[in-house]
Amino acid sequence: MTVTEAAAERLVRIGEVARGAGVSVRAVRYYEQQGLLVAERSPSGQRLYRQDAVPLVRFFQQMFAAGLTSRRITDLLPCWDSGHTDAGQRAMLRAERDRIQTKIDDMQAALDRLDEVIAITDTHP
Amino acid sequence: MTVTEAAAERLVRIGEVARGAGVSVRAVRYYEQQGLLVAERSPSGQRLYRQDAVPLVRFFQQMFAAGLTSRRITDLLPCWDSGHTDAGQRAMLRAERDRIQTKIDDMQAALDRLDEVIAITDTHP
DNA sequence: CTAAAACCTGACGCTAACGTCAGAGGCAAG
DNA sequence: CTTGCCTCTGACGTTAGCGTCAGGTTTTAG
């Protein structure tokens, strides 16, 4: 059921993508510049995106929030697109995973320390 | 038992603090510039720190890792030093706490997505 | 038809926590 | 004394993900 049907996909302009994903237009252009996103062009030169660009941009945001760089995301995009991965990509996936886990642990430790202080300052004003 | 005894505290120079805390000398100077750290000076102008500067710098690192800025840390330092806090500081503590918690959740979500992909690419090479 | 809204391409600005010189003084050892 | 390591004060460089003009074209609403 892969939509190989070239059934005239509805294309949207950059503003709609940006609003849909909750980011700025500038951000979407930046993603294209970084090779994260590809867009067709209208005869007049305006960017045209398929609707799946919206969840894709949301995904980028999620990865950015996790501390991945746009470079890393481009390197790992094939893992999503094609499902195919080579050894290097699998290693990168694991490395990023471990890095994120470590960062979560660090932040949890910091959170615990803050909570200690909050508890103290609340009971001891 | 507060060590009000001016019992000639052993003072250390910046290199020892940096090595002890696992940061660069430049970082320690930066913390002073940002008002996080205060140092006495030797007659010749070299910075002299008390040994508790080492755990303090480690603490800064932990807060930085959690996304606090040096500005925020200076604002909240009195909560540690004096144990005394006003309403504004308590609000800031909670705000930072909530921000960190949100970020942890975001990163956990990203981690879960990465783990999905890892699972797929491992079973489906 | 016309005005507003949206889009385009540069290109400089911004922030935060340092890195990295450069040039000069300070300090214990041999 | 001098060798070598540590420290000092500036001060500019870096990185990443955008923000923010500037100046011009295009699309849309009425």
Image (tube, coloured by chain):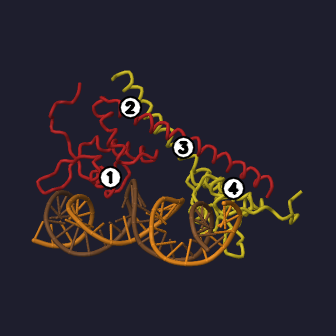
Chain colours: A red, B yellow, C orange, D brown
User: Are the two marked residues, 2 and 4, in contact with CB atoms closer than 8 angstroms?
Assistant: no
Measured as percent of width and height from the top left, residue B62 is found at 62, 51
Q: Look at discs 4 and 3 and give the one toward the viewer.
A: 4
Measured as percent of width and height from the top left, residue B115 is found at 45, 31
What's the CA distance linking mark 2 and mark 3? 20 Å
Q: Look at discs 1 and 4 and give the one toward the viewer.
A: 4
User: Are the two marked residues, 2 and 3, in contact with CB atoms closer than 8 angstroms?
Assistant: no
Helix, strand or loop at mark 3:
helix
The type of residue carrying mark 4 is Val
Residue at the location (57% across, 49% down)? B100
Measured as percent of width and height from the top left, residue C28 is found at 71, 63
Label 3 resides on the chain identified as: A
Q: Residues within 10 Å of mark 2 (few under 14, many from 20)?
A: some
Q: Which mark is residue B54?
A: 4
Left-right relation of B95 to A117: left
Q: Which mark is residue B35?
A: none
Question: Is residue A22 in view from this perspective?
Answer: yes
> Where does label 2 land, which residue?
A90
Label 4 resides on the chain identified as: B
Residue at the location (68% across, 48% down)? A113
Viewer-closest of C17 and B121? C17
Label 2 resides on the chain identified as: A
> Where does label 1 land, which residue?
A18
> Where does label 3 land, which residue?
A103
Residue A83 position (above or below residue B91): above
What's the CA distance linking mark 1 and mark 3? 29 Å
What's the CA distance linking mark 2 and mark 4? 39 Å
The type of residue carrying mark 2 is Arg
Viewer-closest of A71 and A26? A71
Viewer-closest of D2 and D12? D2
What's the CA distance linking mark 2 and mark 1? 31 Å
